[in-house]
């Protein structure tokens, strides 16, 4: 890949980092939509999980179409440019969020779902285009730094979305309104304007031009690699489990035997679940850095300490103490996994299985904190699975990456399955569904990642 970076990439980097933030924010806002849509349309859990089915199903449909086009005629993004690819993704996203207005006017759940599907198509294009694009807009030597910063802001978006989104949808825009859809209509119109504004800003910023001369491999040659075949299943189950737990969290915390929390309060605890991913990702990034062992260990122990005081200030010292215990277990898990991708994946999957079993067998604060803490251990799974899956693929790497993006379909199907189970055996017991996912992830970390036949 050849590129000509402009000398001043600070402002473009800020704009694209803002894009990553909004991207993460909107994805997790679905967790707030689920209980709200249940209230408006009197849905059961299975029907409410159609929100995730349509949103993450769009990832599969979009990436599948993209895969077949790139395999037959070449990479579309390379032909139109990554900048234009991002703009088109933002246009789709703006259309998707705007559809919430007619959905609210006609009080139509199918139109809401259509908006989420279009929004998911937009995010699919952003997923394909934005990650490599932010790497080429400046000095190649600092590309990794820019990507890490953008991913960190993506996690920040997923962390604060439950707090801000819960306040806007359950409280601020809902006050004094007889129209239950009003509290959804206005926030999503605002996001539609944000997407359009970002698109216009990116359109008129002078950014680097580049061409990609990599050959596009035709056929399905990537599937001859067992680590990729098993990895596709792993991504499917991981994304499905992560999204399913987050989607069920507010309903779970609202159960009398767990915490009996109203939706607004429960959304604050949901922020801790997603915040755990951010904390774990920072620790994971440092663990794989080139710092000396002493510096690395010092920073690894400092991150949970800072997080403890931040949580204590926003919530309370009691809540920070509960979460602090989980952070200590998280750090111990990194050391047991020896900071390697496969071993850490294996260890974290086992820890999550134990947390879920403990939660199912208990009630009250024990059950509650076991589920909230899962975010800490989900943190490194996407990157570890992805890296292990494409290792050794050579010329089939791009094709393998496309197949892995398709596996995000798990975020559409597994929440739907857990919703169905929740309707039949209860929300609390429905967490047996993600346990099955993590059993497979433990297998992948132990053996499935290997590039040889098992």
Image: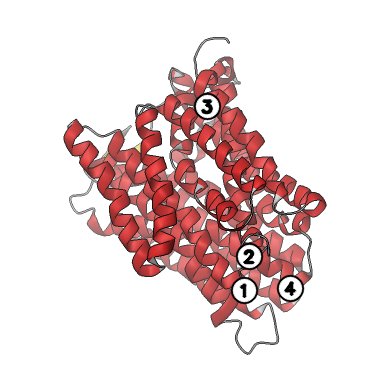
Frontmost residue, 279 versus 216: 279
Q: Residues within 10 Å of mark 3 (few under 14, many from 20)?
A: many
- Tell me which numbered mark, 2 or 4, is placed earlier along the sequence: 2
Q: Identify the residue position indicated by label 2 in the image.
A: 33
| x, y percent for residue 10 | 23, 56
C-alpha span from label 2 to label 3:
33 Å
Marks 1/2 in contact by CB < 8 Å: the verdict is yes
Which numbered disc flags the more N-terminal residue, 3 or 1?
A: 1
Q: Measure how far apart labels 1 and 2 are at the Cα level.
A: 8 Å
Say what secondary structure mark 2 lies in.
helix
Residue 63 visible: yes
- Whether residue 353 is situated above or below residue 38 in the rendered picture: above
In screen coordinates, is 222 left or right of 114? left
Residue name at image x 53 percent, y 53 percent: 369
Q: Earlier in the sequence, mark 3 or mark 4?
A: 4
- Identified at 52% across, 69% down, the residue is 165
């Amino acid at each position: 890949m050849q590129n000509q970076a402009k000398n001043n990439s600070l402002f473009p980097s800020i704009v694209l980092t803002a894009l990553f933030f909004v991207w993460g924010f909107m994805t997790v806002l679905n967790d707030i939509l689920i209980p709200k849509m249940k209230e408006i349309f009197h849905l059961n859990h299975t029907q409410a999980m159609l929100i995730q089915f349509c949103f993450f199903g769009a990832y599969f449909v979009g990436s599948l179409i993209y895969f077949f086009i790139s395999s037959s005629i070449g990479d579309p993004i390379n032909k139109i440019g990554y900048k234009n690819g991002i703009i088109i993704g933002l246009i789709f996203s703006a259309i998707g969020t705007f559809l919430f207005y007619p959905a609210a006017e006609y009080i139509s759940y199918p139109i809401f779902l259509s908006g989420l599907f279009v929004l998911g198509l937009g995010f699919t294009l952003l997923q394909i285009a934005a990650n490599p694009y932010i790497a080429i807009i400046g000095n190649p030597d600092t590309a990794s730094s820019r990507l890490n910063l953008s991913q960190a802001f993506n996690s920040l978006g997923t962390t604060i979305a439950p707090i801000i989104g819960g306040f806007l949808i359950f409280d601020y825009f809902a006050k004094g309104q007889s129209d239950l859809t009003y509290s959804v209509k206005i926030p999503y119109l605002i996001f539609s304007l944000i997407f359009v504004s970002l698109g216009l800003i990116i359109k008129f910023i002078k950014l680097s031009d580049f061409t990609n001369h990599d050959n596009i491999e035709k056929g399905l040659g990537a599937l001859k690699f067992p680590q990729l075949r098993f990895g596709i299943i792993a991504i499917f189950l991981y994304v499905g489990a992560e999204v399913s737990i987050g989607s069920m969290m507010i309903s779970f915390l609202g159960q009398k035997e767990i915490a009996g929390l109203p939706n607004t309060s429960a959304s604050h605890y949901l922020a801790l679940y997603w915040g755990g991913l951010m904390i774990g990702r920072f620790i994971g990034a440092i663990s794989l850095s080139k710092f000396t062992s002493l510096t690395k260990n010092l920073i690894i122990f400092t991150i949970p300490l800072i997080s403890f005081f931040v949580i204590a200030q926003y919530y309370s010292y009691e809540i920070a103490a509960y979460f602090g215990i989980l952070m200590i277990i998280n750090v111990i898990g990194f050391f047991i996994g020896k900071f390697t991708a496969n071993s850490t994946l294996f260890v974290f999957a086992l820890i999550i299985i134990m947390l879920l079993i403990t939660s199912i067998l208990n009630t009250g604060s024990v059950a509650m904190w076991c589920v909230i803490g899962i975010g800490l251990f989900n943190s490194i799974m996407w990157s570890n699975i992805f890296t292990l899956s494409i290792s050794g693929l050579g010329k089939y790497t791009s094709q393998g990456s496309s197949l892995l993006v398709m596996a995000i379909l798990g975020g559409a199907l597994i929440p739907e399955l857990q919703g169905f189970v929740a309707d039949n055996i209860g929300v609390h017991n429905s967490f047996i569904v993600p346990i099955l996912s993590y059993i497979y992830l433990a297998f992948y970390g132990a053996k499935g990642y290997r590039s040889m036949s098992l």
